[in-house]
């Protein structure tokens, strides 16, 4: 999954110091009515929080700590906010998505109660639930905090027993599929409008990479990976989002430069940052039209990546997404 900028790390770390859910990407299926703007905003908030939890758990695993323990701590700490956004999704959606998020809200509601048993006041829990997803300073949100470390540890143990019910990988298939469809419709998950080999042909990818690529669809992200004759690994990724509003989301936390001369609304930044993964190598360009957002990332090893190259791929992808 694309690693979005994680603006809540400081928040959860502050509480967890005093003291995720495996949001696997399901396969898409047919059906349904379009989600409302309210549903999409809440879904994006939910997904950013989930990314935060996954990131924290991955760091723990890399540091020889228990990723599961850290995941559960973060979920407990973020329970008030996750309960609020889950309720919002449930209220503005039809089944089966509504049922999925009602269940999520119920579990997070128990987490919020456990936080109160550990020392947070009802007003502080309410403040956490109402805070925007990009809030940065926990002190401004909560004020003075009087958490009992023993009670917090007990709350964490109790919540660990509930956390298994948050794993979307174990949700009924129709709920899993509804989650995927909503993410695609809201522009949170990419979905190629045509096969990856039609979105960018093998010949076009070879011209960029300097070698014939292996083409794959990785959770909606079209990837083109190759090795040159001297063994250098190179990669290209193209993500197509079915929403122009995804443009602002994919640029969050970056320092983009204007590239409108090479692609519609083009903005480019250093590093390879696609839904399927990221690295400091290479460069990424975002572009959009009235219906879609396209993100093109490339890492060419020691070779620099030109915005004109990325812009050409992005412009072609927008045209093909529009059926031109």
Image: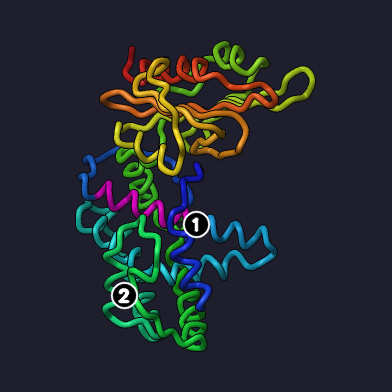
Q: Residue drawn at (60%, 64%), measured in percent from left and top?
A: 67
Q: Would you place residue 199 above or below residue 25 in this image?
A: above
Q: Position of residue 18 (x, y in %)?
A: 50, 78
* Image quadrant assignment for residue 224: top right
Q: Report crowding for label 1: few under 14, some 14 to 19, many 20 or more residues within 10 A (C-alpha).
A: some
Q: Residue drawn at (44%, 73%), measured in percent from left and top?
A: 162
Q: Where is residue 118 in the image (x, y as percent from the top left)?
A: 42, 85
Q: Would you place residue 106 above or below residue 240 in this image?
A: below
Instruction: Name the residue nearer the viewer: 164 or 56.
Output: 56
* Image quadrant assignment for residue 299: top right
Instruction: Give the dominant element type of the magenta stretch: helix, strand or loop.
Output: helix
Q: Residue drawn at (63%, 21%), measured in percent from left and top?
A: 213
The magenta span reads 39-54
Q: Report crowding for label 2: few under 14, some 14 to 19, many 20 or more residues within 10 A (C-alpha).
A: many
In the picture provided, is 73 more to the left or to the right than 230?
Answer: left
What residue does disc 2 label? 125
Figure quadrant of the C terminus: top left
Q: Residue drawn at (31%, 76%), measured in percent from left and top?
A: 124
Q: Is mark 1 on a helix, strand or loop?
A: loop
Q: Is mark 2 on a helix, strand or loop?
A: helix
């Amino acid at each position: 999954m694309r690693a979005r900028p994680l603006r809540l790390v400081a928040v959860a770390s502050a509480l967890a110091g005093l003291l995720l859910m495996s949001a696997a990407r399901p396969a898409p299926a047919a059906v349904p009515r379009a989600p409302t703007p309210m549903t999409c905003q809440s879904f994006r908030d939910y997904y950013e929080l989930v990314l935060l939890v996954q990131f924290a758990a991955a760091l723990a695993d890399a540091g020889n700590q228990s990723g599961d323990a850290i995941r559960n701590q973060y979920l407990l700490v973020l329970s008030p906010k996750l309960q609020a956004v889950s309720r919002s999704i449930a209220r503005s959606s039809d089944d089966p998505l509504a049922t999925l998020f009602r269940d999520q809200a119920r579990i997070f509601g128990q987490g919020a109660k456990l936080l109160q048993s550990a020392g947070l006041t009802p007003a502080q829990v309410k403040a956490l639930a109402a805070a925007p997803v990009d809030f940065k300073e926990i002190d401004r949100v909560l004020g003075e905090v009087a958490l009992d470390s023993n009670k917090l540890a007990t709350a964490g143990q109790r919540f660990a027993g509930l956390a298994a019910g948050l794993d979307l990988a174990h949700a009924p298939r129709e709920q899993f599929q509804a989650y995927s469809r909503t993410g695609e419709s809201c522009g949170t998950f990419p979905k190629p409008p045509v096969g990856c080999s039609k979105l960018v042909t093998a010949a076009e990818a070879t011209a960029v990479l300097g070698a014939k690529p292996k083409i794959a669809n990785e959770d909606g992200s079209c990837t083109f990976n190759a090795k040159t004759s001297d063994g250098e690994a190179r990669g290209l990724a193209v993500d197509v989002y079915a929403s122009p509003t995804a443009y602002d989301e994919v640029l969050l936390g970056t320092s983009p430069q204007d590239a409108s001369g090479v692609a519609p609304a083009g903005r480019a930044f250093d590093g390879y940052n696609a839904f399927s993964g990221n690295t400091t190598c290479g460069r990424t360009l975002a572009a959009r039209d009235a219906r879609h957002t396209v993100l093109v990332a490339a890492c060419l090893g020691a070779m620099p990546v030109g915005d004109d190259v990325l812009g050409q791929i992005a412009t072609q992808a927008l045209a093909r997404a529009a059926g031109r």
